[in-house]
Image (cartoon, rainbow, N blue to C red):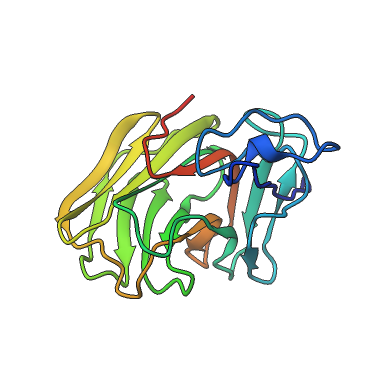
Amino acid sequence: MRGLVLLLVASACGRLGFDAAPADAPAVEPCAHLFCDGFEDPALPLWDGATIDVGSTIARDAMFGRSGASLHALGDIGDSVAAQFVDVFPAAPPTDERVRVYIFTAAASDLNVEPLSISNPGRNNQIVFSLYTDSVDIHAHGMAGGFNVTRQAPPPRDRWVCYELHVVIGAAGEVELFEDGVLAAEKTGIDTRPPAGDLSRVLLGITSKDPATLEDLWFDDVAADTAPIGCN
């Protein structure tokens, strides 16, 4: 397996991401969002940590990516998590939270996984999206407004796919998932206020999966913001 590790650096203007790389780091494009990572630097100074089950791995892949390197998560059979995490959104939840990521999955691989989660640090309040062999969905764990919305169509394979998860936080909130800029699933009029107080944490990789499957995914060009991000 190709080896890998993640990166993120703080900018002079207080944002996290590309524009604050140290002098000896590889050149990276400026970050126009609260948080950006294209995985061009092997250091991980601003990721707050990783959650990795025994037998699984998550690391930087210097040899493969949408643009340069990428993040490679491999979830072994019997395990459920191999994810990097960072607390990027305010503890007092803003109205909107958005995370954009490009994901590559091989055609022959298993696909029964939650690759992205927006949650509180304790992970008892979560809004996630899932990739399956024949569908994608958005759903919640531990939220007052529980929901599960499925789009019954196989997600693209063998290419980089742009996903953006959007959460409108409120008593009559909304969750949207965009695939390559097109709305793939949405749920409106739901209580998206986190009972534990915040949705500050972003988890990326294999945030949960069916323990009976082996999951193999690559991630690139991650961005988080309170304004629309889009695909580029």
Which residue is at the front of the view, 189 or 155?
189
In percent of width and height, residue 202 lies at: 49, 56
Which residue is at the front of the view, 116 or 75?
116
Q: In the image, what residue occupies the spot 19% across and 63% down?
A: 191
Residue that protrudes farthest toward the right in the picture: 24
Q: Is residue 41 visible to us here?
A: yes
| Count of labels in the image | 0
In percent of width and height, residue 119 lies at: 42, 63
Which residue is at the front of the view, 224 or 93?
93
Q: In the image, what residue occupies the spot 38% across and 44% down?
A: 226
Q: In the image, what residue occupies the spot 44% across and 61% down?
A: 200
* Quarter where residue 170 is shown: bottom left
Vertical side of 177 occupied by 200: above or below = below
Q: Is residue 105 visible to us here?
A: no
Image position of 20 (left or right of 43): left
In percent of width and height, residue 1 lies at: 77, 48
Q: In the image, what residue occupies the spot 67% across and 63% down?
A: 56
Vertical side of 86 occupied by 29: above or below = above
Image position of 49 (left or right of 226): right
* Quarter where residue 219 is shown: top right
Residue that protrudes farthest toward the front in the picture: 13
Image position of 199 (left or right of 224): left
Which residue is at the front of the view, 60 or 108?
60
* Quarter where residue 49 is shown: bottom right
In percent of width and height, residue 172 lies at: 15, 56
